[in-house]
Image (spheres, rainbow, N blue to C red):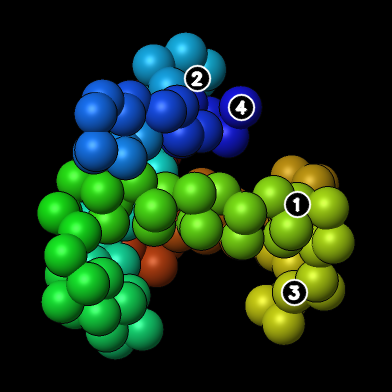
Amino acid sequence: MLCGAAPLPASSGRTHRHRLNRGGDRQANAALYRIVLCRLRWDLRTRAYALRRTTEGMSKPEIIRCLKRYIIREIYTALLNPQPSSVPAITSTAPEESTWSARSAARTNDVDTDKR
């Protein structure tokens, strides 16, 4: 159901429109909306798309609906075919392997650690 971003026909007479499906995961739909707003503000491809669709006569809510569907397709593809990350994984060391301790940190910062 595309996180509540699936189109439902809402046509009447000569007007052919769609509205968003109100079912689905509302939190995911809210996240999609935020992604769309950020892309509309910062992504040049998305801004060019919105400008083109505006000249075609689409309203801003219709453009946002189309962008949500496009983004959810991108996310779905990325989830099915994950790419290896170029960022190295963060490995945590066990406390006994750590070379940095609270006592050595206190000595570095000149804090008295003696019990009184």
Distance from Cα at disc 3 to Cα at disc 2: 28 Å
Name which of mark 1 and mark 2 comes first in the sequence.
2
Q: Secondary structure at mark 3?
A: loop
Q: Amino acid at mark 4?
A: Met
Q: Residue at left 36%, top 84%? A: 45
Residue 16 locus on image (x, y percent): 32, 40
Q: Amino acid at mark 1?
A: Leu
Q: Residue at left 67%, top 78%? A: 87
Q: Residue at left 61%, top 27%? A: 1
Residue where numbered disc 4 is placed: 1
Say which of 114 and 4 sits in front.
4
Name which of mark 4 and mark 1 comes first in the sequence.
4
Residue where numbered disc 1 is placed: 79
Say which of 49 and 43 sits in front.
49
Residue 79 locus on image (x, y percent): 75, 52
Residue 49 locus on image (x, y percent): 31, 77
Distance from Cα at disc 4 to Cα at disc 1: 16 Å
Location of residue 88 with respect to 20 vertically, above or below: below
Q: Amino acid at mark 3?
A: Ser
Q: Residue furthest front?
A: 14
Query: Which of the labelled discs sits on residue 85, or is there none?
Result: 3
Q: Please tell me whether mark 2 or mark 4 is closer to you in this view.
A: 4
